[in-house]
């Protein structure tokens, strides 16, 4: 057996066991036997082609493609270069392909029940230059080939419509050390450690309505060491016919990679014609991609384009993003001669780090295409579906359905992970002696907590990361907040949380708790009961985080948080009425009481500056209030047409759509304060392709009646007086230079936010600057608050592909007068 030169064998002290756990009931056993009898009969009518693919030096070629020409059928080799393919009796032309190597064509005849071994060694690819006439005075012929591909891009993007197909996805991770950082790859969090640290497989059914609409239904899932959950790995294919086929998100920065055949590609790439090769009965032109700068979101590598039809046939790409490192991406199409189309066949993502002996493969194969397939009975807006039925299939199912055979190491990894769950303590200890262990270092625990905001204590219990803060009302504050989540036998979720709070300067103890219950997961229906005695911000939102307020208070005596005490009990219910139409109804009783500063502690002990009063500064004056009672009821309704959603084990997870979202709300307050008010918001995103994406949000609100209001009852807005970008929204709006309370009012407001993300459409074309990989942004915000002067601000932003931080500068105007400006950083921290 040919093996990769980087492969290391692991000696596991275990007995051979099935790779999956399966405990059938009588009914399940009947269907299992029926499946086995049927599949065995069908397989008896099939032949098996198997073998290996290696280089001429004998090195295994992981994920090389084995394609049946003209039949849209094939497979890939595994990590050790081995393959297996079930075929009906007949004669086939089999093409063995690996990017950068000369394809090998074999004509094979296979009989029913026959196992036919074919081992292939591939030579490095040799191209010839006489397929295209090259003149000394003319431009490189690659440019004309790319222009032809650009002309056909939209045509080929739209041709794969109303088809169904299957997808097999494998995610494999292996490391030689325990010193790797966590990696989030396509929604799966990987924590590398010595040995095979992650292995999962999925089989999905897909239906593609058109170029931009499809749904995917998970049929089977297998995860090393986990028989209770399903793999989060969705199938992925890099479609270069899309202008921006691939993106990497880090913090607040989205780096959208530019297709080498996008309409604006000549602004980012140069090209070199390397020559032509024959693949089957097709002539392929090999084009080298030469990014015009190293900092832009571009690919390096080669693409292969079919002569005359100008289709992309395959590609061998690399990204060199500082965020994800160097990633290799290989894509291949497969020809269906009967339909005269090229279909997506495989995409592999490869991350390697030789210094840590780290290998990560995310490999996808697409097969069993059906043209003009019946439209699925599921909702067209369903994006990803994980059914209620068991996704844990028996070994026999995987052995017959798995298009890529397991390596010996992968088989052992599955086996040893299941043996660890054995109740036999002696066996468990025996395995643990030889099993590469994952060391969960304090840094890794902290890294995970930063990403989620929680410190995981048990499978169900978590502690909020922010356990200590400082404010002028309480001084130092110890505030542990525990959250417990559990899925009931009915499949519904139950969540309880308890928050405790003690101020060392005020010497006051506070506590609150709540319970949320999922009434109907399919209609996103939840009920929440909450109550207690706690401290809240007067604005009713978290415009000033505890961390930012503590930093500004201790450093500069700028206590931006304005706090009040609240004794309350509340009941809230929410549900999706129809797809895209949500309703939330709530009612709460509140006893509100003002609070005063109790601490003047500051890092600068020589400072004579006094802290600001713990009162909201509204339209030129500090406004205090007396303790009072309020009973408030509210209703909010929102609608977004054709909203996409995931359906996970009977639980609906709303996403978004290209249509505007409209939201309206009404609040009614009675008892010692009385009011009625409404607000409305409409927001939408607009994708302009190569020139970026725009976001716009417009809102209006008005008090219909008001009597004896406290500052807590006013309209408040998401302002900002710090160097940290304000990401949160109130009434769909946020501002970067707006005083937190100056524009609060008890009459009406009208506001708007606008932001355009140009990506690298501006500086990506400027010599010298384009090497920095700069993304640019433009922002414009407006607020008319009652009869007070209007407020507006204009801003520009820059981010670099090297850093997950965005830098912004804003200019603010009161009425027509320019009066302030400021710099701020945009990060998720």
Image: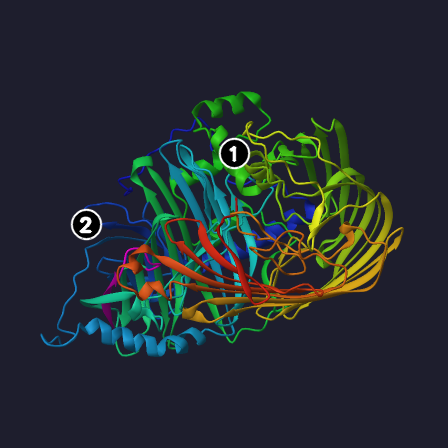
Q: Residues within 10 Å of mark 2 (few under 14, many from 20)?
A: few
In the current view of this chain or complex, which residue is farthest to the right? 671
Q: At numbered mark 1, what does the secondary structure look like: helix, strand or loop?
A: helix
- Residue 579 in view, yes or no: no
Report the front residue among 176 and 640.
640
Residue at the image position 64 percent from the left and 51 percent from the top: 740
Is 366 magenta? The answer is no
> Disc 2 designates what residue?
56
Report the front residue among 245 and 87.
245
Report the front residue among 660 and 64.
660
> Disc 1 designates what residue?
446
Alpha carbon of mark 1 to alpha carbon of mark 2: how far?
Answer: 47 Å
Residue 756 % position (x, y): 49, 65
Residue 674 % position (x, y): 87, 56
Q: Are marks 1 and 2 in contact (CB under 8 Å)?
A: no
Q: Which residues are magenta?
A: 283-298
Q: Quadrant of residue 524?
A: bottom right
Is 295 magenta? The answer is yes
Residue 549 % position (x, y): 60, 40
Tell me if residue 474 comes above or below residue 716 in the rendering: above
């Amino acid at each position: 057996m040919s093996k990769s030169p980087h492969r290391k064998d692991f000696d596991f002290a275990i007995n051979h066991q099935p790779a999956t756990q399966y405990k059938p009931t009588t009914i399940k056993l009947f269907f299992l036997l029926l499946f086995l009898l049927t599949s065995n009969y069908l397989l008896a009518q099939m032949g098996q082609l198997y073998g290996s693919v290696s280089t001429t030096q004998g090195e295994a070629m992981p994920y090389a493609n084995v394609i049946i020409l003209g039949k849209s059928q094939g497979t890939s080799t595994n990590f050790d270069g081995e393959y297996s393919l079930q075929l009906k009796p007949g004669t086939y032309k089999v093409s063995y392909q690996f990017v950068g190597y000369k394809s090998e064509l074999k004509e094979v005849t296979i009989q029913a029940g026959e196992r036919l071994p074919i081992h292939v060694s591939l030579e490095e690819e040799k191209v010839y230059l006489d397929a295209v006439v090259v003149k000394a005075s003319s431009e490189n012929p690659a440019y004309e080939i790319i222009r032809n591909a650009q002309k056909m891009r939209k045509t080929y993007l739209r041709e794969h419509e109303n088809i169904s197909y299957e997808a097999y996805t494998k995610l494999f991770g292996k490391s030689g050390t325990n010193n790797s950082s966590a990696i989030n790859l396509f929604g799966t969090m990987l924590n590398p450690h010595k040995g095979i640290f992650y292995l999962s497989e999925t089989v999905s059914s897909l239906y593609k309505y058109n170029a931009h609409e499809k749904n995917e239904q998970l049929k089977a899932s297998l995860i090393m060491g986990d028989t209770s959950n399903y793999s989060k790995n969705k199938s992925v294919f890099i479609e270069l016919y899309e202008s921006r086929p691939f993106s990497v998100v880090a913090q607040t920065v989205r780096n959208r990679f530019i297709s080498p055949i996008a309409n604006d590609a000549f602004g980012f790439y140069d090209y070199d014609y390397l020559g032509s090769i024959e693949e089957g009965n097709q002539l392929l032109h090999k084009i080298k991609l030469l990014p015009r700068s190293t900092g832009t979101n571009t690919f390096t590598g080669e693409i292969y384009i079919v002569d005359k039809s100008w289709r992309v046939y395959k590609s061998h790409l690399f990204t060199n993003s500082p965020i994800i490192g160097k990633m290799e991406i290989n894509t291949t199409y497969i020809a269906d001669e009967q339909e005269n189309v090229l279909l997506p066949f495989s995409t592999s993502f490869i991350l390697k780090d030789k210094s840590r002996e780290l290998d990560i493969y995310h490999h996808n194969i697409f097969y069993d295409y059906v043209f003009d397939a019946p439209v699925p009975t599921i909702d067209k807006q369903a994006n990803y579906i994980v059914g209620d039925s068991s996704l844990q299939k028996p070994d026999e199912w995987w052995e017959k359905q798995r298009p890529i055979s397991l390596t010996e190491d992968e088989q052992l990894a599955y086996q040893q992970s299941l043996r660890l769950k054995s109740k036999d303590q002696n066996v468990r200890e025996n395995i643990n002696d030889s099993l590469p262990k994952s060391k969960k270092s304090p840094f890794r625990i902290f890294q995970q907590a930063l990403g989620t905001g929680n410190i995981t204590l048990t499978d169900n219990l978590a502690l909020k990361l922010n356990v200590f803060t400082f404010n002028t009302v309480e001084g130092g504050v110890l505030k542990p907040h525990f959250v417990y989540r559990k899925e009931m036998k009915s499949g519904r979720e139950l969540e309880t949380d308890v928050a405790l709070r003690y101020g060392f300067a005020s010497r006051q103890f506070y506590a609150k708790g709540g319970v949320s219950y999922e009434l109907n997961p399919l209609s996103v229906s939840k009920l929440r009961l909450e109550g207690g005695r706690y401290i809240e911000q007067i604005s009713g939102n978290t415009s000033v985080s505890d961390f930012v307020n503590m930093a500004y208070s201790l450093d500069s005596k700028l206590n931006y948080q304005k706090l009040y005490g609240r004794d309350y009990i509340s009941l809230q219910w929410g549900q999706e009425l129809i797809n895209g139409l949500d309703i939330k109804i709530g009612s709460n009783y509140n006893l509100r009481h003002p609070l005063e500063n109790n601490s003047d502690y500051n890092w600068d002990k020589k400072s004579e500056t006094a802290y600001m009063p713990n009162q909201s500064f509204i339209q030129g004056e500090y406004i205090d209030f007396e303790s009072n009672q309020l009973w408030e009821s509210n209703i909010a309704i929102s609608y977004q047409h054709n909203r996409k959603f995931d359906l996970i084990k009977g639980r609906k997870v709303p996403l978004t759509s290209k249509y505007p979202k409209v939201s309206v709300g009404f609040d009614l307050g009675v008892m010692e304060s009385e009011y009625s008010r409404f607000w409305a918001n409409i927001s939408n995103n607009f994708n302009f392709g190569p020139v970026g994406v725009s976001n716009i949000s417009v809102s209006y609100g008005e008090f219909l009646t008001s009597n004896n209001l406290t500052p807590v009852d006013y309209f408040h807005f998401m302002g900002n007086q710090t160097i940290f970008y304000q990401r949160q929204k109130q009434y769909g709006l946020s501002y970067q230079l707006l005083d937190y309370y100056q524009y609060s009012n008890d009459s009406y407001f009208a506001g708007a936010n606008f932001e355009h993300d140009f990506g690298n459409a501006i500086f990506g074309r400027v010599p010298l600057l384009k090497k920095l990989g700069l993304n640019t942004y433009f922002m414009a915000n407006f607020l008319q608050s009652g009869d007070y002067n209007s407020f507006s601000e204009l801003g520009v932003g820059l981010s670099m592909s090297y850093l997950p931080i965005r830098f912004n500068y804003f200019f603010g105007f009161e009425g027509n007068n320019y009066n302030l400006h400021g710099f701020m950083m945009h990060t998720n921290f």
